């Protein structure tokens, strides 16, 4: 693991305007994640976990403070630059698998490669990733023919197939039973150990958080532990 932080925030704040009311979702968050770490962020609903996720992924902007991902200062980036960041530097896994139902599993993965300007089967470890995730034999099936665990593994393959510097996972086991949750978490840990994939996982489940190197706890928009 490198000592240089891949992710760094300083006094990060986010305020949402709801009618005449200002709602502070983040209140001065200071965070560092080193390259190669697997970090879990836990906390109750409304603690700011998802807002932090969206800012680090370039999906929304902070109101104040600084957020840097892989050397990119997100506050200084234009929307087109943040779009490029999402294509090349950050991978996303969500609680809902978000697979396109009319496409096969293989085509769902291929879209991510196409968006990033890569060939469908370029010799960059593509097949090795699919074998590691146990989905290489399911590429011709559409999502409705796959179990929940298989769909999430396809979603993970889509997220990492372009070798992003950072994988952001938002409640990746939220829709899975305990058996499939264990499979998915074990695969994520393998990706971290074998490929050095940096992972920041948001979860409300302490059992899921236990798979990470360390756990960061949030409450009321602040890191409390």
Image (spheres, helix red, strand yellow):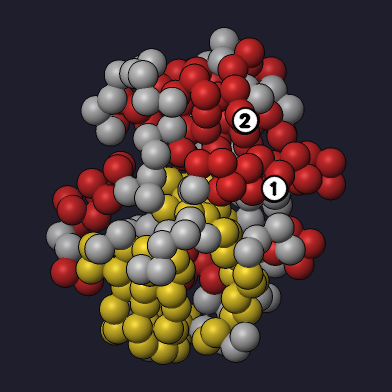
Residue 109 at what x, y percent from top left? 46, 26
In this rendering, the answer to whether 201 lies above or below 141 is below
170 lies left or right of 15: right
Of residue 15 and residue 172, the one placed in the foreground of this image is 172
In this rendering, the answer to whether 138 lies above or below 205 is above
In this rendering, the answer to whether 160 lies above or below 29 is above
Question: Is there CB contact under 8 Å for labels 1 and 2?
Answer: no
Q: Identify the residue at the far top of this view.
A: 140
Residue 197 at what x, y percent from top left? 49, 48
Q: Residues within 10 Å of mark 1 (few under 14, many from 20)?
A: some
The residue drawn where x is 49% and y is 48% is: 196
In this figure, what is the number of numbered marks?
2
94 lies left or right of 58: right
The answer to whether residue 33 shows anywhere in this view is yes
Quadrant (top left/top right/bottom left/bottom right) for the C terminus:
bottom right
How far is disc 1 from disc 2 in space, using C-alphas? Answer: 11 Å
Residue 98 at what x, y percent from top left? 53, 38
Q: Hey, which quadrant is residue 40 in on the image?
A: bottom right
The residue drawn where x is 63% and y is 56% is: 171
The residue drawn where x is 52% and y is 66% is: 50
In this rendering, the answer to whether 162 lies above or below 91 is above
Q: Secondary structure at mark 2?
A: helix
Of residue 189 and residue 22, the one placed in the foreground of this image is 189
The residue drawn where x is 57% and y is 64% is: 39
- Disc sitting over residue 6 in the figure: none
| Disc with the residue nearer the chain's start (1 vs 2) | 2
**To which residue does mark 2 refer?**
133
Q: Residues within 10 Å of mark 2 (few under 14, many from 20)?
A: many
Residue 134 at what x, y percent from top left? 66, 25
The answer to whether residue 13 shows anywhere in this view is no
143 lies left or right of 14: right
**To which residue does mark 1 refer?**
185
């Amino acid at each position: 693991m490198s000592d240089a932080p891949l992710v760094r925030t300083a006094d990060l704040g986010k305020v949402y305007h709801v009618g005449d009311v200002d709602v502070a979702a983040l209140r001065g968050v200071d965070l560092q994640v080193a390259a190669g770490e697997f970090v879990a962020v836990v906390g109750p609903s409304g603690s700011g976990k998802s807002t932090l996720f969206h800012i680090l992924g370039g999906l929304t902007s902070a109101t104040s403070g600084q957020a840097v991902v892989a050397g990119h200062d997100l506050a200084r980036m234009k929307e087109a630059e943040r779009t490029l960041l999402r294509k090349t530097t950050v991978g996303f896994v969500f609680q809902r698998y978000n697979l396109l139902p009319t496409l096969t599993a293989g085509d769902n993965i291929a879209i991510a490669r196409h968006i990033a300007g890569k060939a469908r089967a370029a010799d960059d470890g593509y097949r090795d990733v699919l074998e590691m995730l146990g989905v290489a034999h399911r590429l011709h099936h559409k999502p409705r023919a796959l179990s929940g665990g298989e769909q999430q593994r396809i979603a993970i393959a889509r997220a990492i197939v372009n070798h992003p510097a950072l994988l952001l996972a938002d409640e990746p086991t939220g829709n899975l039973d305990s058996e499939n949750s264990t499979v998915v978490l074990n695969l994520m840990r393998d990706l971290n150990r074998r490929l050095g994939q940096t992972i920041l996982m948001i979860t409300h489940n302490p059992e899921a958080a236990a798979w990470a190197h360390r756990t960061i706890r949030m409450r009321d928009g602040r890191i409390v532990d």
